[in-house]
Image (spheres, rainbow, N blue to C red):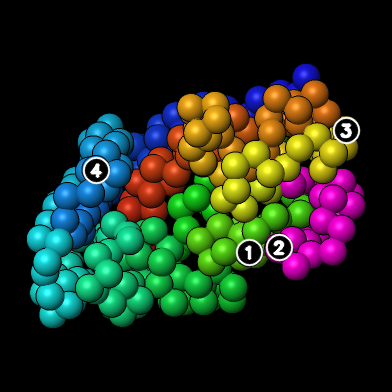
Amino acid sequence: MAELLKGKPVADALDDATKKRAEALKEKGITPTLAILRVGERPDDLSYERGATKRCEKDGVAVVNKVLPDDCSQEDLMEAIKKLNEDDSVHGILMFRPLPKSLDEKAACDAILPKKDVDGITKGSMAYIYSGMGEGFAPCTSQAVMEILGHYGIDPKGKKATVVGRSLVIGKPISMLLMNANATVTVCHSKTIDMLKVTQNADIVIAALGRAEMLGAEYFTKGQTVIDVGINYSQEKQKLVGDVKSDEAENVVSNLTPVPGGVGSVTTAVLVSHVVEAAEKEIR
C-alpha cells in the first residue's frame, strides 16, 4: 500500500513558519495584508473567502474585502484594482475567478501588479516562473505540489517527472517549478502518443488533467510518487475524487496524495505565505 502524502501536516508546518514571519514583520511595524476582491456572491467564492480569511487570522495576516456587484462595469472593476495596487498597506491581491461573462477577465488579471499577485495569475507572474527574474508568484496550487514534495523529503533533483496536463494554472507552471528543482520533466496532454508508457517511465507523476479518475493502475509502476491535483465530483460515487483511481494506484505506487485532503488543503496555506513574502520584499 502507498504511503498517503496528506496535506494537513504540510499546511500546518507552512502555517507555523508563516506566523513567525508575520510576527517578525509586525515587530517592524508592518502588518502583512491580503485584499480579497470579489465580484458577486457565488457560493464557491464565499466558501473560499471564509477559508482564506480564517487561515489569514490564524497566521497573523490582515484581510480587507472589496466586494463589487455582479453587474458592475469593467470600469468599476479596473478602478477597484487600481486602488488596491496603489494602497501601500495592501501586500497581496486575491481576485476570485471566473468573473461574470460581461467582464474582461484577462484585462483584470493583467491589471494586478505582479508584486501583489499572490495567486500567480498575471503575465508578470508567468514571466517570473519561466525566467526566474522580475516580480510575481507561482500559482498557489502549483507551489502546493512543491511544498508537499519538500515536506515529505521527496527531492525532484535528477528524477524523471511527468506532468499530465498543460494548463496555465497547473500543468505548465508546475513543470517549470520541477525543472527549476533539477528534475527532468515531460509534459503529457491530449495529443500525447502512448501516454501510458510515458507515465510508467517516471519517478514522479503529477496528475493535473481535470478528468475524474482517468488514470488507473496501468499508468503506474512500483516506487513512484504520484501527486493528484485533480478535484472532481463523481456523480457515480457521490463524492470528490481525483484524476487518479486511487483505490487502484495505491496498490502499485509508493506515495500518493489523497483527494480530498491532499494538494487542495495546502493551497490556502501557500496563498497566505505569499502575502507575507510580498510584505517582506517591500522592506528589502
Q: According to the image, label 4 marks what residue?
A: 43
Instruction: Residue at 56%, 44% (x, y): give it.
Output: 230
Q: According to the image, label 1 marks what residue?
A: 166
Q: Position of residue 197 (x, y in %)?
A: 89, 52
Q: Position of residue 157 (x, y in %)?
A: 78, 52
The image quarter in which residue 245 lies: top right
Q: Residues within 10 Å of mark 3 (few under 14, many from 20)?
A: some
The image quarter in which residue 280 lies: bottom left
Whether label 3 touches label 2, CB < 8 Å: no
Relative depth, front residue between 147 and 164: 164
Q: According to the image, label 2 marks what residue?
A: 189
Of the residues shown, which amino acid type is indicated by label 2?
His
Of the residues shown, which amino acid type is indicated by label 4?
Pro
Instruction: Residue at 22%, 73% (x, y): give it.
Output: 102
Q: Is residue 150 visible?
A: no
Camera-nearest label, 1 or 3 = 1
Q: Earlier in the sequence, mark 3 or mark 2?
A: 2
Q: Earlier in the sequence, mark 4 or mark 3?
A: 4
Whether label 2 touches label 1, CB < 8 Å: yes
Of the residues shown, which amino acid type is indicated by label 1?
Arg
Q: Which mark is residue 222?
A: 3
What SS does tag 4 mark? helix
The quadrant of the picture occupied by the C terminus is bottom left
Q: Residues within 10 Å of mark 2 (few under 14, many from 20)?
A: some
Real-space CA distance between mark 4 and mark 2, rounded to the nearest whole angstrom: 31 Å
Q: Position of residue 200 (x, y in %)?
A: 87, 46
Real-space CA distance between mark 1 and mark 4, rounded to the nearest whole angstrom: 28 Å
Q: Position of residue 159 (x, y in %)?
A: 82, 51
Q: Is residue 194 magenta?
A: yes
Q: Earlier in the sequence, mark 1 or mark 4?
A: 4
Q: Is residue 128 magenta?
A: no
